[in-house]
Image: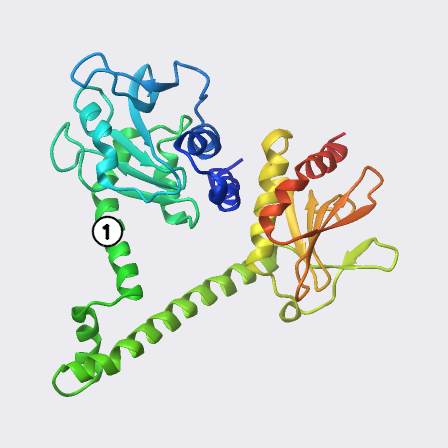
Amino acid sequence: MELNERIAALSAKVRKQRDSIRTEEAAKNAFVMPFISSVLGYDVFDPHEVVPEFTADIGVKQSEKVDYAILHGGEVQVLVECKKSSEPLRIEHAKQLYRYFTVTNARIGVLTNGVEYEFYTDLDSPNRMDARPFLVLNLSDVDETLLPELRKLTKENFDLGSVLDAAGELKYIGEIKRTLAAQFRDPADDWIRFFVTRVHEGAFTKKVREQFTPLVLKAASQYLDDQVNERLRSALASGSSESQPETERGDGSTEESTDSDSEIITTLEELEGYHIVKAIACSEVRVRPERIVYRDSKSYFAILMDDNNRKPIVRLRFNGKTRKYIGTFDSEKNETRHLISSPEEIYEHTGAIRDAVRNYLE
């Protein structure tokens, strides 16, 4: 699987399970180890690649340990410190990383609660871990622009030098983006003043601030909605040129649809479901990701093998106002519909999805 597909699969798992993960150990087992294994590509059970409860020989307090050390080329390259997923990360949580950073060859420190991953290095002072991360990855809301840099830390594409070269820019871009997000949620006086002075003549008084604060928030929200809708329209236009929609005949078989593109709307939920099915299908079955495709229609969202109507893997029926269904197929291509409440529940039908793909491979 591609990195973005592995991230999407783990992200869906995090959103589904995070409320039931109460302890640090549970966060390690449910989220952190799969991140190191499936996303970064290291064997968590091979001590030549991943060392749990890592202790340096010198320079740190006795019995103090870092949760994981990731090795590449026989050297410790990445240190990982874990906390409870129910608690937000704070810089105080990184005290072990700070101390171990000075006595190992590691140039990357990761502080995580299994949901959010903060990546640190030593930009400000050599061999001394920075107080602020250069990259923050949130699995409950993945920023895909960060994935090219994350790919450089995977076992297959490890490129520490390139990561460090880009870290400075990433650090400040990330901080600016988080500052912008904070201003969209709770704008400061300077932020309100910036816009008011460009659209309003007169002094920036308390009354003017109170008048314009909700207007700035409303304009910002509408602008973000416009950007999201534009990206979605672009994605749908691209997808419609690659896949022709299909309709269902009375006998259950399918044919290419003559419906106009404007009558078929591919939703974000359907696309999320597609990525989950694709991740499941490729995780254990030896099949290339590009062989798993989708075709949308007014009746259902079909996920197929080899873009072939006669090789259905599942059908997602998410167009109902109150109910959603996933249709799975047996060896005779008989469809069974299952009621689900969200795309994450597709994981409950992992076995049927893999069986369908295996049937077509055989």
Residue 322, percent from left and from top = 66, 64
The residue drawn where x is 28% and y is 55% is: 177
| Residue 242 visible here | yes
The way the protein has been coloured in the rendering is rainbow
Between residue 111 and residue 335, name the one nearer to us. Answer: 111
| Relative to 287, residue 295 above or below | below
Residue 301, image quadrant: bottom right
Residue 342, percent from left and from top = 60, 53
Between residue 134 and residue 145, name the one nearer to us. Answer: 134
The N terminus: image quadrant? top right
Between residue 27 and residue 221, name the one nearer to us. Answer: 27
The residue drawn where x is 80% and y is 40% is: 330
Amino acid type, residue under disc 1 in the picture: Glu
Between residue 93 and residue 138, name the one nearer to us. Answer: 93
Mark 1 burial class by Cα count in 10 Å: few <14, some 14-19, many 20+: some
Residue 287, percent from left and from top = 63, 33
The C terminus: image quadrant? top right
| Relative to 212, residue 133 above or below | above
Residue 222, percent from left and from top = 39, 73
Residue furthest to the front in view is 22
Of helix, strand and loop, which one carries label 1?
Answer: helix
Residue 104, image quadrant: top left
Residue 77, image quadrant: top left
Residue furthest to the top in view is 57
Residue furthest to the right in view is 251
The residue drawn where x is 43% and y is 24% is: 42
| Relative to 303, residue 22 above or below | above
- Residue beneath disc 1: 175
| Residue 40 visible here | no
Q: Is residue 33 left or right of residue 265?
A: left
